[in-house]
Image (spheres, helix red, strand yellow):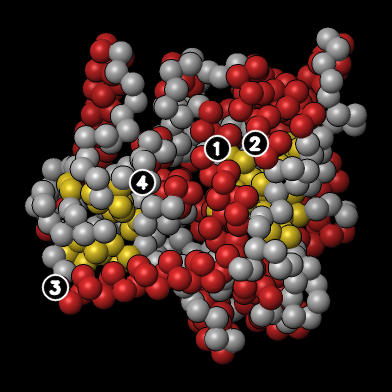
Amino acid sequence: ALAGFMRAPPGRPAPEGEDAVAARRRAGEFREIGRRLIRNLSGTPYRSFSALPDGAILVAEQLRPADAALIDPSRIAAVVTEEGGSTGHTAILLRALGIPAVLAAHGLLAQLGRRTRLVVDGTTGQVIVRPSTRTAAAARVDVAAYARERQMLGRLRRLPARLSSGEVVTLQANLEIPAELPMIAQSGAGGIGLLRSEFLFMNAETLPDELHQEAVYLPLIEAMAGDPVTIRVVDWGSEKNSDALSRAGIGESGDTNPALGVRGIRLLLQHRGLLETQFAAILRAARAGPVRVMLPLVSSVGELRAARDIYARIGRRLRRKGVEIPDPLPPLGIMIETPAAALMADVLAQEAEFLAIGTNDLTMYTLAADRAATDVAALYDPFHPAVLQLVRMTADAALRHRRPVSLCGEMASDPIAVPLLVGLGIRSFSMHASAVPRVKRAIRALAMDDCRRMACRALEAADGREVSTMLMDYAAAARQPADE
Ligand code: PEP
Ligand code: MG
């Protein structure tokens, strides 16, 4: 991908003071209000970046998850943003779309003109401005090698995800948007471990009703042909945004820190109609195959109990109406994404039917470092022993209470991290579909003893750097490519 395109105005003073940062954020909010006003007044549909030339690289100061969802991967060669982080939702969506991307390329726009050529390497996180002919040719060779490797990994599709010492691991796919379904089918994933239902609310003017949602879930469940689908009820808030919810007056709380405000299950319990509609739609669609229902951002057992009461009530209501729904109801589980939930995993595991560890948020809340912020990217480290302790506590609690536990944060797609996570007691992983084959390759090369040994050492390590060095050394010794 060698064409250049610049969307935001170039240049900004560096380093910025707090005032400048606040002013820039405020300016962003005003721009957004302007965009909404114009779109609503002119009845314009959501932008799909259709004005960009084919093969362009989109370079922006910032890209919202909802905008990322509108990108056509067959037309946009790559995306680079000055802000953002690798586990933010914009990055997650770009990965789902299979678009090479580099985020947090601070200061890049100032170096670009409208037709500047770039090489974007999403694997190493490198952006080369005005590459020489030789560098551009080398990049083309890398692209071909990457395609060959993917083809080779494709051959693993039918092989089991079994350690060399015999233990079997479950690999499932995360789904952000329905367009990913063919890729999930090709990946060899054994079901969907995390269906992020936010796409139903993104780039939509109105809230999707029960029948609309049912019609979206049904083909997804059918396509998995008997493999389980874990649907997470909408996790609105923090960096995610939805016009449909804002127009319904939901979630515009003006929290000074949205990540610590009304998001996830908190928002759903404040707006119970939203939760009821989604529960009802999922229960209706559950006739098509095995389904599990998952609650986001739980921080206390009271939230689980309140949601469970609503779930049971909706089940009774549908049965009274004669709607065919599974009996018993599909399992209701929770995400472990807050330190409080991990520390209370023993209590939660008694009442939740399954646990899924969301390391993206768990890392953010444990280390008090925003997952989507460039300036604290170096502090945001899922290998930090504090995060690993919480993963271990959750896995142990699940084992004690015989509850299934999985891990569905971005960490699950990192072949370097997987030996450690297996050693910490995780046997089920969910990740973006294109990562499934290379994680399977890593798993098939592992011995359980090594995994346990690494987990013990990691839990005693002084910091995340020590853990990643240990894991990289192990990967190098095992001749596993430390690739993206
Ligand atoms: C997580 O927090 O790890 C997670 C899987 O949820 P999301 O990335 O959607 O916040
Ligand atoms: Mg999360």
Gap in angstroms between the C-alphas marked 4 and 2: 23 Å
N-terminal of the pair, mark 4 or mark 3, is 4
- Asked if residue 150 is positioned above or below residue 32 in the image, the reply reads below
Calculate the distance from the C-alpha at mark 3 to the C-alpha at mark 2: 45 Å
| Amino acid type, mark 3 | Ser
- Residue 132's disc number: 3
Mark 1 is surrounded, within 10 Å at the Cα level, by few (under 14), some (14 to 19) or many (20 or more) other residues, namely some
Q: Is residue 97 left or right of residue 51?
A: right
Comes first in the chain, label 3 or label 2: 3
Which circle, 4 or 2, is nearer the viewer? 4
Total residue callouts: 4
Report if the beta carbon of the residue with label 3 is closer than 8 angstroms to ligand 1.
Answer: no
Question: Where residue 470 sits: x, y (%)?
Answer: 55, 83
Q: Quadrant of residue 232?
A: top right
What quarter of the picture does the N terminus occupy? Answer: bottom left
x, y (%) of residue 461? 59, 79
Q: Any mark on residue 220, and which?
A: 2
Tag 1 residue: 178
Q: Tell me which label, 4 or 2, sits earlier in the chain.
A: 4
Mark 2 in CB contact with mark 1 (< 8 angstroms): yes
Q: Is label 1 within 8 A of ligand 1 (CB to nearest ligand atom)?
A: no
Q: CA distance from mark 2 to mark 1?
A: 7 Å
Q: Residues within 10 Å of mark 2 (few under 14, many from 20)?
A: some
Frontmost of labels 4 and 1 is 4
Q: Which mark is residue 216?
A: none
Earlier-in-chain disc, 4 versus 1: 4
Look at mark 4 in the image and give the residue it sits on. Answer: 74
Helix, strand or loop at mark 2: helix
Please name whichever residue, 248 or 69, is drawn nearer the observer in this view of the structure.
69
- Residue type pointed to by label 1: Pro
Badge 3 vs badge 2, beta-carbon distance below 8 Å: no
